[in-house]
Image (cartoon, rainbow, N blue to C red):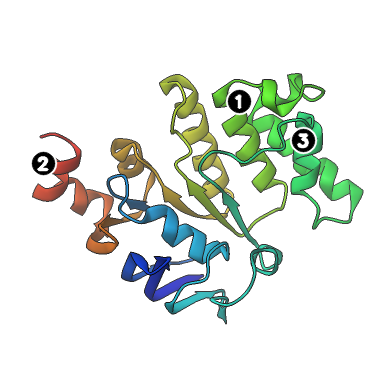
Amino acid sequence: MLTVTDLRVSYQDAPAVNGVSLSLSAGELVSLVGSNGAGKSSVLAAIAGLHRPIGGSVVFDGRDVSRLPAHAIARLGLALVPEGRRLFAHQTVRANLILGAYLQRDRAVRAELLARVVSLFPVLGERMGQKAGMLSGGEQQMLALGRALMSKPRLLVLDEPSLGIAPRTAELIFDAISQVRAEGVTVLLVEQNLRAALRLSDRLYVLQTGSLVLAGTAAELEESPLIRQAYLGL
């Protein structure tokens, strides 16, 4: 479904991503992990069309999208949940969710998607008339994920969904991601909680200073000396 080949990204001539290659098959959950500043968010921004790469290619469902704008890539079925949530803080929860379904013209489909989001995150059903900016951090993350799901994506791209939220709430979000994946949505996850990423993922890629240094299944990487020492503290 997604093939990234020799991706290179820079900001004002400062390199951020150096020749990264990765792939996802339909139905997989694949994680991209690494320390802060490794270039993970830059990879996602290039995939989603928010930042144009200076080299390499991004092929989504057989089409090269490396030079397409973000809205055109979204129309092809890719939804990004960015780090920091990027909600419309002064709009209600309902308005944020409905804005996520702007590609869905059928009211019945929108209603069905809204019901599905509420089934995943019942608290959002209780907060429909509340402004998004008044939600807790965990509730805002649920809303950001729900908004992305309202577009009915085939590929869901998540940037640090557990960052800055309570562990119990993070587990609710991880459970929702697993449910979405079980329903057939392909997931690319950037996650600073490596133990959670190992538990959720089919495969993982490890990024350091803009370059890939390891790749493999969750079982393989969990036994890697680099992972055990640098990331798990073992």
Q: Which mark is residue 139?
A: 1
Which of pointers 1 and 2 lies earlier in the amino acid sequence? 1
121 on left or right of 39: right
Q: Nearer the viewer, mark 3 or mark 2?
A: 2
Which numbered marker is on residue 229? 2
Which residue is at a point 62% across and 39% down the rendered structure image? Answer: 144
Name the residue type under label 1.
Answer: Glu
Query: Could you tell me which residue is drawn at 57 percent across and 76 percent down?
Result: 65
Q: Quadrant of residue 233?
A: top left
At 57% from the left and 74% from the top, the residue drawn is: 61
Q: Does any portion of residue 24 appear in the rendered image?
A: yes
Give the class, few, some or many, for how many residues have Cα within 10 Å of label 3's Cα (few <14, many ≥20).
Answer: some
**What number is the disc on residue 85?**
none
Percent coordinates x, y for residue 98 in the rendering: 80, 42
- Amino acid under label 3? Ala
**Residue 117 screen position, x and y as percent:** 69, 36
Establish if 143 lies above or below 104: above
Three-letter code for the amino acid on which mark 2 is drawn: Gln
Q: Using the numbered discs, state the Cα–Cα distance from disc 3 to disc 1 in whole angstroms.
A: 17 Å
Whether residue 34 sits left or right of residue 115 in the image: it is left
> Residue most toward the right?
107
Dot 3 corresponds to which residue? 115
* Mark closer to the chain start, 3 or 2: 3
Nearer the observer, 203 or 7: 7
